Image (cartoon, rainbow, N blue to C red):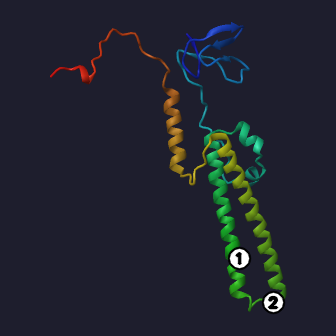
C-alpha cells in the first residue's frame, strides 16, 4: 500500500506517479520537493547520515555561504560545521595570543626590523582570527534562525547519538495497530475497594 513518508497515512493517486497525502497536504512522487511516496508506512530513505562535511577542510568551510547553510544543510551538518569552526577559531586565537605574549616578553631582545616583522605576523593572525570568528557567528545565527536553538558546546557523542537515533527511527515502520479494539478501560477512580 502506498503511504506518506511523513505521517504514514494512506495516500491517494493524484495523477500519473504523483500521490496526495490529505493529512499532511503534500504531493509526493518523482520530482516532488517533499520526496517520493512510501510503501506500507516506510519513512524517508536515508542513504547515509548527513554530517557530510569534509572536516578540517578550511577552504571548504571558508567558502560556505548563508544560502548553502539555509537551503541544503541539515541540523547534523550545521552542528558538524559549527563544531569545526569553533575549533579552528580557538586554534587561531591561541596562535594570536601566543604571538602577542612572545612579542611582549621578548620586545627588548628583538631588533626594530624583527619587531616590525613580528607585528605584521600578529596583524595577519588577527585578521585570520577575526575571519573565523565572523564565520562562526554566521553559522551560529543561521542555526538560531533555522532551528531556533544553537548549542553552547557540541560534543562528538552528541553527533553520534543524533546519528544512532536517526538510523533507529528510519528503520521503524509508521504503522498504527488496530485502534478500534473493544477493550473496556477502567480508571483508578472508579475501582471500588
Q: Position of residue 70 (x, y in %)?
A: 72, 40
- Could you say where residue 129 lies in the image, as x and y percent from the top left? 73, 64
Circle number at residue 111:
2
Question: Viewed as shown, does residue 9 lie left or right of 58?
Answer: left
Q: Residue at x 77, y 74 (%)?
A: 122
**Residue 57: in sight, yes or no?**
no
Name the residue located 65 percent from the left edge and 38 percent from the top edge: 74
- Total number of numbered discs in the rendering: 2
Classify 10 Å Cα crowding around label 2: few (below 14), some (14-19), many (20 and above).
Answer: few
Q: Residue furthest bottom?
A: 108
Q: Secondary structure at mark 1?
A: helix
Q: Nearer the viewer, residue 77 or 145?
A: 145
Image vertical order of residue 157 relative to residue 171, above or below: below
Image quarter of the N terminus:
top right
What residue is at 45 percent from the left and 17 percent from the top?
A: 176
Instruction: Of the two numbered discs 1 and 2 on the same chain, state the one appearing first in sequence.
Output: 1
Mark 1–mark 2 CB contact (< 8 Å): no
Q: Secondary structure at mark 2?
A: loop
Can residue 21 be spotted in the picture? yes
**How dense is the environment of label 1, judged by Cα within 10 Å: few (below 14), some, or many (20 and up)?**
some
User: Where does the image place residue 185, in percent across and percent down from the top left?
Assistant: 30, 16
User: Is residue 25 toward the left or the right of residue 115 in the image?
Assistant: left
How far apart are the alpha carbons under marks 1 and 2? 16 Å
Residue at 71% from the left image edge and 7% from the top image edge:
15
> Where on the picture, by quarter, is residue 111?
bottom right
Residue 99: mark: 1
In percent of width and height, residue 103 lies at 72, 83
Q: Residue reaching furthest left?
A: 193
Q: Which mark is residue 43?
A: none
Image quarter of residue 193 = top left
Amino acid at each position: 500500500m502506498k503511504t506518506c513518508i511523513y505521517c504514514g497515512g494512506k495516500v491517494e493517486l493524484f495523477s500519473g506517479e504523483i500521490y496526495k497525502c490529505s493529512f499532511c497536504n503534500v504531493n509526493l512522487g518523482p520530482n516532488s520537493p517533499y520526496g517520493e511516496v512510501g510503501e506500507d508506512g516506510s519513512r524517508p530513505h536515508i542513504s547515509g547520515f548527513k554530517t557530510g562535511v569534509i572536516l578540517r577542510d578550511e577552504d571548504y568551510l571558508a567558502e560556505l555561504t548563508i544560502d548553502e547553510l539555509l537551503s541544503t544543510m541539515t541540523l547534523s551538518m550545521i552542528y558538524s560545521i559549527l563544531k569545526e569552526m569553533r575549533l579552528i577559531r580557538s586554534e587561531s586565537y591561541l596562535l594570536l595570543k601566543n604571538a602577542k605574549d612572545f612579542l611582549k616578553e621578548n620586545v627588548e631582545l628583538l631588533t626594530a626590523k624583527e619587531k616590525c616583522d613580528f607585528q605584521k605576523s600578529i596583524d595577519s593572525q588577527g585578521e585570520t582570527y577575526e575571519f573565523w570568528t565572523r564565520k562562526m557567528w554566521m553559522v551560529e545565527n543561521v542555526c538560531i534562525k533555522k532551528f531556533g536553538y544553537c548549542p553552547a558546546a557540541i560534543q562528538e557523542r552528541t553527533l553520534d547519538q543524533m546519528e544512532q537515533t536517526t538510523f533507529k527511527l528510519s528503520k521503524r515502520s509508521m504503522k498504527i495497530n488496530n485502534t478500534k479494539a473493544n477493550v473496556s478501560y477502567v480508571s483508578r477512580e472508579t475501582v471500588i475497594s
